[in-house]
Image (spheres, rainbow, N blue to C red):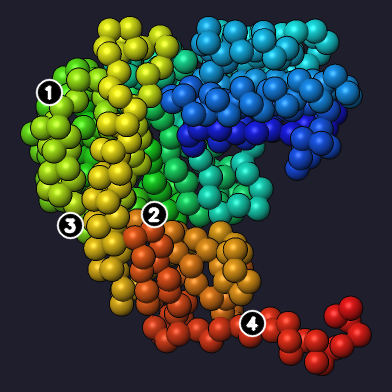
Amino acid sequence: MKAHLITYGCQMNEYDTHLVESQLVSFGADIVPSVDEADFVLINTCAVRGKPVDKVRSLLGDLRKQKAQRPLVVGMMGCLAQLEEGQQIARKFEVDVLLGPGSLLDIGQALEANERFWGLQFKDELHGHIPPPPQGKLQAHLTIMRGCDHHCTYCIVPTTRGPQVSRHPDDILRELDMQLSAGVQEVTLLGQNVNAYGVDQGAKLAGYPSFADLLRLVGRSGVRRIKFTTSHPMNFTEDVAAAMAETPAVCEYVHLPVQSGSSRVLRRMAREYTREKYLGHIAEIKKHLPDVVLATDIIVGFPGETEEDFAETLSLYDEVGYDSAYMFIYSARPGTPSYRHFADLPRELKTERLQRLIVKQKEWSARKNAAKVGTVQEVLLRGEAHESGFLEGHTRGNHPTVVPKAVGASGPGVYRARIEHATPHMLYGRLIGADGQDLPELPRFNPEAAALSHPLQMV
């Protein structure tokens, strides 16, 4: 079998794709780089907003045409597969394999069935499963929990991924050890709400540390860099900020979704905190981590949002001073309370507000990034940038960074770089050695010079 996997959505989906891909390899499948080479195409789907659902519909339409012309098995997995909406799409486009987020280990059974297979149960064995580490990569994702026990009125995740279940710390540390042995230097702990880790275990809590203590445990593993996403402000504790400050491997980066700066809108969202409570968490973080890099999620145009509510979101952005933000127009998702009970706002109004928020975000990101010019940052370089002769990566604060290739540092790795230029979305630097001096750049390819020295080879 030749399999090709396509992933939409969050980092959890990327982790799940790796999990299923490793299962397919263990069954003897070859993973191929394109749909045209595959006889099995599996799409890992997202259902949080309408746009990724539309992309899946379009892709499935194309694959249905290909099925009419050649032998092809089509599968759909992930959050959309768990919903009635996704199941209707699967029927319409003649999907052969449908796997919800809790039934990923059924992939072998699905392919052996040689008929249409749907697996939509939440199975406990998934939580103890340890996939092999990614090969040849410096970064890895590590799921510490699945599901969510909060019920935000706009969110479909509790339906698609089920109730919160924390993985046992022994399984987490075993998977981490495997990743470190494979050369991973940066690990991102994943969960729908990582700072609620262990809370779901109730009477069994003795065997589960708090999230703050889990950070400390992971920090003692020898991993060079630790990040985590995502956090719910309702479960954030000051001990998490303290653990970050005490644990050198934990990066000074916090993604804390606020969604709105208006307490009235937060109440309609059922976010379980107020503007003031959220700002209290920000103050705790800054107390322990004065140089913290802060990111957030914001939903614009939630049903009932007034101009005054939106102005509170803009003012909160100024009060916090975010380094970056993921910003979205509210997307009404079937099956959510807000879809059933609240009237949507006009698209034009939501778009106009989003544009104003983007201006605010660019102003703050430009200001924050400009402050990095002249500083030395630790940069994890992943590999080649789009422009020849350059490498791309990111800092401990998750800033995308580009540097010229240098002698002694021409490939992936963790290096130090002096930042020389910044835009709202990118840092540009130069690699430096242990003595603080710039590393010499490698000579860049010059096509004209090459043509002169090797004219016959340039035909």
Q: Which corner quadrant of the image does residue 340 belong to?
A: top left
Q: Amino acid at mark 2?
A: Asn
Tag in front: 3 or 1: 1
Mark 3, residue position: 290
Q: Amino acid at mark 1?
A: Arg
Relative to 97, residue 249 above or below: below
Q: Earlier in the sequence, mark 4 or mark 3?
A: 3
How far from the left and from the top, in percent, is residue 271? 22, 22
Q: Considering the numbered disc 2 on the image, is that residue within a helix, a strand or a loop?
A: loop
Mark 1, residue position: 264
Q: Amino acid at mark 4?
A: Arg
Q: Earlier in the sequence, mark 1 or mark 2?
A: 1
Q: Is the residue marked by circle 2 packed among few (<14), some (14-19), or many (20+) residues within 10 Å? A: many
Tag in front: 3 or 2: 2
Q: Nearer the viewer, residue 3 or 132?
A: 3
Q: Earlier in the sequence, mark 2 or mark 4?
A: 2
**Which residue shows up at 77% across the image and 86% down it?**
450
Q: Is the residue marked by circle 4 packed among few (<14), some (14-19), or many (20+) residues within 10 Å? A: few
Mark 2, residue position: 398
Mark 4, residue position: 444
Residue lying farthest to the right in this orientation: 456
Residues under labels 4 and 3: Cα distance? Answer: 40 Å
Residues under labels 1 and 2: Cα distance? Answer: 32 Å
Tag in front: 4 or 1: 1
Residue 66 lies left or right of residue 56; in this view the side is right
Quarter holding the N terminus is: top right
Q: Nearer the viewer, residue 158 or 132?
A: 158
Residues under labels 3 and 2: Cα distance? Answer: 16 Å
